[in-house]
Amino acid sequence: MDQRETAQLVEQTHQTCKRVQLEVAKIIVGQDDVVEKVLITLLAGGHSIITGLPGLAKTLLIQTLAQTIGLKFHRIQFTPDLMPADITGTDILEEDHQTGQRRMRFVSGPVFANLLLADEINRTPPKTQAALLEAMQERHVTVRGQTYPLEPPFFVLATQNPIELEGTYPLPEAQLDRFMFNILIGYPSESEEIDVVKNTTALPQDAPQQILTREELLRIQELVRLVPVADDVVSYAVQLVRKTRPDPSAPEFVNRWVNYGASPRAAQFLILGGKARALLRGRYNVAIEDVRVLAASVMRHRILLNFHAESEQISTDQVVEKLLQNVREMKSGLA
């Protein structure tokens, strides 16, 4: 494509995504930042965790996005007694009434969707979590030695309740690392909460219109991968991630507060998310600001703090904020 065709395609994608956001806003009041990051997840082809208190429309948000993009949507309520077969599906023995012969037939589970909502993912045992991990990483499931591919696109959007810890199974670091973002969703403002109450106590609203098709989303995902990124932006993302790891060359506060830093996946997701965010905003290049805006969502679940941080009531978001300041100061000093 020449420069003019590229500009037209970028603008078309920008307008389409804007229509998706406006359609979602008809159902979801406020939460613009959360909606944008979930949409970035879909454009980048990743998975995300949404962490928030009950009653903040996490499920409604994901279901609404699925409707506006025309994706097959399934929801799994994770509970302590959930088994891997409840996610992947299982073989059943059935009899052919004509021949009388019996054979095994695979009955697919809810994981066979384009958009899977894993509600309260930390409430199920590790064995069941592992079944979902294979689907997230490999885009297929294995049942009784037989592999079944998942139709693209495939996304997992998981939710977690940050206050109810009793009866939960913390996600292992290997699984957390597969999630592109950990998106925090908070309470709406007073005016937004008034609108929520008005909207939800009146007659039911019309269902959101479909703006995108599955095929169009797949094409946009390809376009995201083609967005160019300058070497200095990649270097900035890598430097930011490397400084989360305790090391003699790391900042003093990292060595004091951090047990383990972020993996190379963090830098990959910073750049991939930056590409999707740039396209979402009508740009065909990634800026350092894109990386900075996404840094907390990418790294808050990848940095493991130690007892010093806990005793001083330091959060991973505070560590990331200090890192952003530190790397910015270093770049200024080099300039």
Image (cartoon, rainbow, N blue to C red):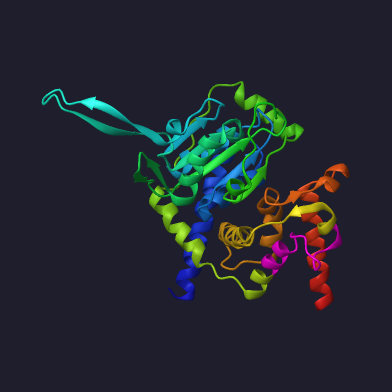
Residue placed most toward the observer, 203 or 210: 210
Q: Is residue 243 magenta?
A: yes
Q: Quadrant of the C terminus?
A: bottom right
The answer to whether residue 27 of the structure is visible from this angle is no
Residue placed most toward the observer, 104 or 219: 104
Locate residue 19 relative to residue 187 in the image: left or right.
left
Locate residue 43 relative to residue 123 in the image: left or right.
left
Q: Position of residue 250 (x, y in %)?
A: 80, 65
- Up-down relation of residue 212 to residue 265 (above or below): above
**Residue that protrudes farthest toward the bottom in the picture:** 335
- Up-down relation of residue 216 to residue 23 (above or below): below
Q: Position of residue 235 (x, y in %)?
A: 67, 71
| Residue drawn at the location 35% of the way across and 39% of the way down | 144
Magenta extent: 236-253
Locate residue 92 relative to residue 69 in the image: left or right.
left
**Residue that protrudes farthest toward the right in the picture:** 312
Q: Position of residue 71 (x, y in %)?
A: 43, 42
Residue placed most toward the observer, 225 or 118: 118
**Residue that protrudes farthest toward the front in the picture:** 145
Q: Position of residue 109 (x, y in %)?
A: 40, 34
| Residue drawn at the location 61% of the way across and 34% of the way down | 122
| Residue drawn at the location 36% of the way across and 32% of the way down | 90
The answer to whether residue 326 of the structure is visible from this angle is yes
Q: Quadrant of the N terminus?
A: bottom left
**Residue that protrudes farthest toward the left in the picture:** 99
Snapshot quadrant of residue 189: top right
* Total tally of numbered discs in the picture: 0
